[in-house]
Image (cartoon, helix red, strand yellow):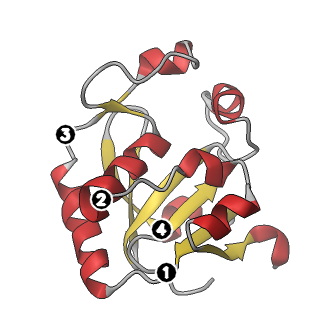
Amino acid sequence: MIPLQTGDIILTHTHSWSDLLSMLRFRSWWTHAAMVYDPKKTVEMTNKNVRHLTIEKRYANKKIRVIRLRNLTIVDRVRLRVAARTLYHTKFDRLRLILPLLPQMRYNYYWCTSFIDLVYKKALGRTINVKWMMQSKKDYLEAIQADIIYDYRNK
């Protein structure tokens, strides 16, 4: 696999109990999103809260896609790490799992996609709308200046 950098977005198709609901909510085959925290770890929203997970254990032999934003500087990557560290207190929004069309109403409760958007907004002042990335909107990826740098289908 290619070397990962802080800020890369990992999309995956997981096999958990919330798969079907995630697929319906995001209208996408991809069911989970995570952000690379350092070259060996991700920061992501799990079924309860934010956690660091080791990339090799979590994503070995799984169907993943890695998206990298162009023009991220080293300072931007450091800001992303600091922003992610300050958001460890956020929790998974189970209410929106049951009622997927419910808007974001509760403070500090997020989905995996909205958590990554929040990290980018806090660090760089802009959201990247990971939900649209999951829906594979190529025009959108070009608009935010992002590239798909790894896709399991292109092995």
Marks 1/4 in contact by CB < 8 Å: the verdict is yes
Q: Residue 134: horizontal and vertical position, in percent?
A: 66, 50
Residue 9 versus residue 70 in the image, above or below: above
The tally of labels here is: 4
The residue tagged 1 is 4
The residue tagged 4 is 55
The residue tagged 2 is 125
The residue tagged 3 is 89
Query: What kind of element bears circle 1?
Result: loop
Kind of residue at badge 3: His
Query: What kind of element bears circle 3?
Result: loop
Alpha-carbon neighbours of circle 3 within 10 Å: few (<14), some, or many (≥20)?
A: few
> Which residue is pictured at 60% across the width and 86% down the height?
2
Residue 103 versus residue 123 in the image, above or below: above
Q: Nearer the viewer, residue 30 or 129?
A: 129
Point out the frontmost of discs 1 and 4. Answer: 1
The answer to whether 28 appears left or right of 42 in the picture is right
> Which residue is pictured at 32% across the width and 37% down the height?
49
Q: Earlier in the sequence, mark 1 or mark 3?
A: 1
Point out the frontmost of discs 4 and 3. Answer: 3
Q: Earlier in the sequence, mark 4 or mark 2?
A: 4
Query: What kind of element bears circle 2?
Result: loop
Q: CA distance from mark 4 to mark 3?
A: 22 Å
